[in-house]
Image (tube, grey):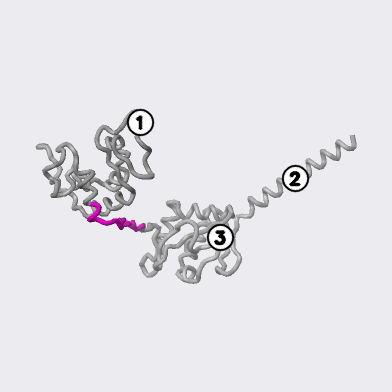
Amino acid sequence: MTAIRKQLSFYVAAAMLAALGQTAQAQDKTFTLAAPETLVSSGLLKYILPRFTLKTQTRITLTTPEAASDAQFGTSGIVAFEGLDTVWKFDAGDDPDAQRFADWLRSDVGRNTVDSYQVDGVALFTSEIKVEKVVVQITYDGDALRGEEVSLSHCGRCHVVSDKNRMNSIGSTPSFAVLRTLRDWEDRFQAFYVLNPHPAFTQIADVTEPFDAMRPSPIHAVEMTLDDLENIMAFVQGIAPADLGSPIQSLQD
């Protein structure tokens, strides 16, 4: 019985310690926040931090970026707001109270609080972050002249490649100029050999599998290399998209 009582006492003590630990963690509700002097001197933090504390009873102690801290405003973390020619990011680290502040910053209440801060009637910060789209222009370094030659030789059987073969193509196939009007023209040209009907008669060296002996090409095979394809891309990128006119409109429009 003595051993059993000792074991029970151990379990009770462990449970009490765990409960005390959870209570202490729940009552912590504080974290240190590092921020650059530029942001501190703007007055924004003195404006928004008390409002977060009032809402959550979480106390935040400001410190400098050089000091140890639980969280910080800097160059990493979530995008919090923009102002003073800077997009300010907030890194909450592993502190649960700092994580809660991060959530508050991007909530409607937090964003409205940031937006409402003014100095002499002028809003210095905004929670509306402007994201600039970067358009990358892809260029192909192949030989465009060689690309035209290969295109006329291999593709000109069916497609109008240029004015040089505009009378010798199949009318039901789109011209290169028409294909250039498509948003995905690059994908179509780069992978044309896997798009029907091309796989049945096209071979790209070191890329496509040889024709099945039981299913040979129905026409004289198109054989080219990846260098040929690069040259074709260089040629096609210089083709002006066809002018297809305005979209058809009904009488009801």
Of residue 92 and residue 125, the one placed in the foreground of this image is 92
The answer to which of marks 2 and 3 sits earlier in the sequence is: 2
Amino acid identity at mark 1: Ala
The residue beneath circle 2 is 16
Image quadrant holding the N terminus, namely: top right
Q: Quadrant of residue 58?
A: bottom right
The answer to whether residue 209 of the structure is visible from this angle is yes
Query: In this rendering, is residue 154 above or below 197?
Result: below
Of residue 56 and residue 240, the one placed in the foreground of this image is 240
Q: Quadrant of residue 81?
A: bottom left
Instruction: Give the mark toward the camera: 1 or 3.
Output: 1
Residue 172: horizontal and vertical position, in percent? 16, 36
Q: Secondary structure at mark 3?
A: strand
Q: Alpha carbon of mark 1 to alpha carbon of mark 3: how far?
A: 67 Å
The residue beneath circle 1 is 213
The residue beneath circle 3 is 71
Magenta-tinted stretch? 131-147
Q: Alpha carbon of mark 2 to alpha carbon of mark 3: how far?
A: 31 Å
Name the residue: 32% across, 41% down. Answer: 203
Amino acid identity at mark 2: Met
The answer to which of marks 1 and 3 sits earlier in the sequence is: 3
Q: Is residue 136 magenta?
A: yes
Q: Quadrant of residue 93?
A: bottom right
Image quadrant holding the C terminus, namely: top left
Query: In this rendering, is residue 90 above or below 194?
Result: below
- Left or right, 169 with respect to 10, comes to left
Residue 131: horizontal and vertical position, in percent? 36, 57
Instruction: Give the mark toward the camera: 1 or 2.
Output: 1
Query: In this rendering, is residue 59 above or below 218?
Result: below
